[in-house]
Image (spheres, rainbow, N blue to C red):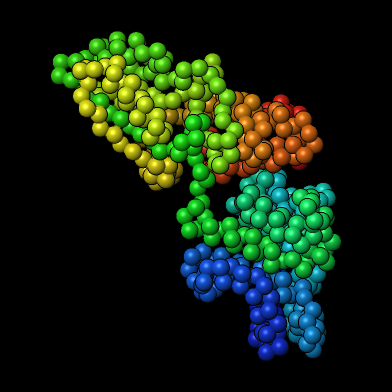
């Protein structure tokens, strides 16, 4: 007896000439625009993305094909197959095929994920209340507020995912909505009318293409967002090491450091290098990417750190411009107490590659989990509280507190918060301090907890 969702018999039926030709038409709709743009064949696409994704993509086209009627004998392959070969299939297999026959690809936001069992899925395109889905495999990797393009089909009283499931990033979602607006939207309108099931059924290839263009961009090396500091400089970490001159002690250097107006001493060997005066972030500079900086409780931004380690003074900064500026300040203030510095430079990608694996054996120097969690959560509390009053690119460079003053802004803020939650949850371990952070207070403080779902 075939498995309940086994489509092998239907796929063998596809080998018939009339159905093979029909499937090629659908296949071309899903892939030719991408293949032509990249001057490649489908096999090359599989080499870039991997065989598993290639099979999933093929499945998306095949499921679309199952819904269509063609000008051939039988009209639809599911109808014809069940008429001729249905006696070979079990009740669940036939129910699954019939459900696929009338299925619709849409974009869903998932929540209430119970790994290995179920989740709730809210249709972002057609609206409506979230629906329960019985799902074993995908729930082991999906996180709260993930977006997926998939067909949800009823089979013997339960909603299940079809095989062609594509995880959508925010950028892929924007690509999709741009494509759907071009098809269904009114001229000069950014609003997407709610399409009927029939209309949406006819646009299944737009989902595949939106996912592919986004995924290929990231697969070709552009997956990291642009990272910059609040000055608009690219994030590149600089460690400038000044050797202490012969006979000079750390105390000698500390006395000079304490005379530098921009340095704030944390302890005997560590100083924060602060800006001259607090100021707001530049909206124009933030618009192009994610901004990374630290701000003190008094509103001053941290431009770098200065630390005494053994026979070296270390200046750390997150951009080349800040490193040059800090080096000049140190050399002017310290004079002959230090020698010519050496600089180590590391990009974000190099920093990530150098991180130890999360499943590595813990060392004696590792913090206990509960202490690490407390430290990380306190840091995130401070960072996110500051962010509520700072411009955010996803909100049109408005602060979250400003954005929630309009209905459209409230929706954008809700999407932004879901994005933050989702990224925080995507850690290899569910016990990671980032994964256990609770964003509930932000929803409540912004007055939009009713939009959390």
> Which residue shows up at 75% across the image and 57% down it?
181
Please state which of residues 241 and 331 is positioned toward the viewer in this rendering: 331
Going by the image, does 392 lie left or right of 313? right
Q: Residue at x 74, y 63 (%)?
A: 105
Q: From where the camera sits, is residue 183 visible? A: yes
Name the foreground residue: 300 vs 335: 335
Q: Nearer the viewer, residue 320 or 7?
A: 320
Q: Residue at x 40, y 16 (%)?
A: 263
Q: Position of residue 149 (x, y in %)?
A: 68, 58
Q: Quadrant of residue 358?
A: top left
Residue 364: percent from the left, percent from the top? 36, 31
Q: Nearer the viewer, residue 421 or 327?
A: 327
Taking the image as shown, residue 438 lies to the left or right of residue 189, namely left
Residue 253 in the image: state x and y as whole percent.
27, 14
Quarter of the image where the N terminus is located: bottom right
Q: Is residue 47 above or below residue 195?
A: below
């Amino acid at each position: 007896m075939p498995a309940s969702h086994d489509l092998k018999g239907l796929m063998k039926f596809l080998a018939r000439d009339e159905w093979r030709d029909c499937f090629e038409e659908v296949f071309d709709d899903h892939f030719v625009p991408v293949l032509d743009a990249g001057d490649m064949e489908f096999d090359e696409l599989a080499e870039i993305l991997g065989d598993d994704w290639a099979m999933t993509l093929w499945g998306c086209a095949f499921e679309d094909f199952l819904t269509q009627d063609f000008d051939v004998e039988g009209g639809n392959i599911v109808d014809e197959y069940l008429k001729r070969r249905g006696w070979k299939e079990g009740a669940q297999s036939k129910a699954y095929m019939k459900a696929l026959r009338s299925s619709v690809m849409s974009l869903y936001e998932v929540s209430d994920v119970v790994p290995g069992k179920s989740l709730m899925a809210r249709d972002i395109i057609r609206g409506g209340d979230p629906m329960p889905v019985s799902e074993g495999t995908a729930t082991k990797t999906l996180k709260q507020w993930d977006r997926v393009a998939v067909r949800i089909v009823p089979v013997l009283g339960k909603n299940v995912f079809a095989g062609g499931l594509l995880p959508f990033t925010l950028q892929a979602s924007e690509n999709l909505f741009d494509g759907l607006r071009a098809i269904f939207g009114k001229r000069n309108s950014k609003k997407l009318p709610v399409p009927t099931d029939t209309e949406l059924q006819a646009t299944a290839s737009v989902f595949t293409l939106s996912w592919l263009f986004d995924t290929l961009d990231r697969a070709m090396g552009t997956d990291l967002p642009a990272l910059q500091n609040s000055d608009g400089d690219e994030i590149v970490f600089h460690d400038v090491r000044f050797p202490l001159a012969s006979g000079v002690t750390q105390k000698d250097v500390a006395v000079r450091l304490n005379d530098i107006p921009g340095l704030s001493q944390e302890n005997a060997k560590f100083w924060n290098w602060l800006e001259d005066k607090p100021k707001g972030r530049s909206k124009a500079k933030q618009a192009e990417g994610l901004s990374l900086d630290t701000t003190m409780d008094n509103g001053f931004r941290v431009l770098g750190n200065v630390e005494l380690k053994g026979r070296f003074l270390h200046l750390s900064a997150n951009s080349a411009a800040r490193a040059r500026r800090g080096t000049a300040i140190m050399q002017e203030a310290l004079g002959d107490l230090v020698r010519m510095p050496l600089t180590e430079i590391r990009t974000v990608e190099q920093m990530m590659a150098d991180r130890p694996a999360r499943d590595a054996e813990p060392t004696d120097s590792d913090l206990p989990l509960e202490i690490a969690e407390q430290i990380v959560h306190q840091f995130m509390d401070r960072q996110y509280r500051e962010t509520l009053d700072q411009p955010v690119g996803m909100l049109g460079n408005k602060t979250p507190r400003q954005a929630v003053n309009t209905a459209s802004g409230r929706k954008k803020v809700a999407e932004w918060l879901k994005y933050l939650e989702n990224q925080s949850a995507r850690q290899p371990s569910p016990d990671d301090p980032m994964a256990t952070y609770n964003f509930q207070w932000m929803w409540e403080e912004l007055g939009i907890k009713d939009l959390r779902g």
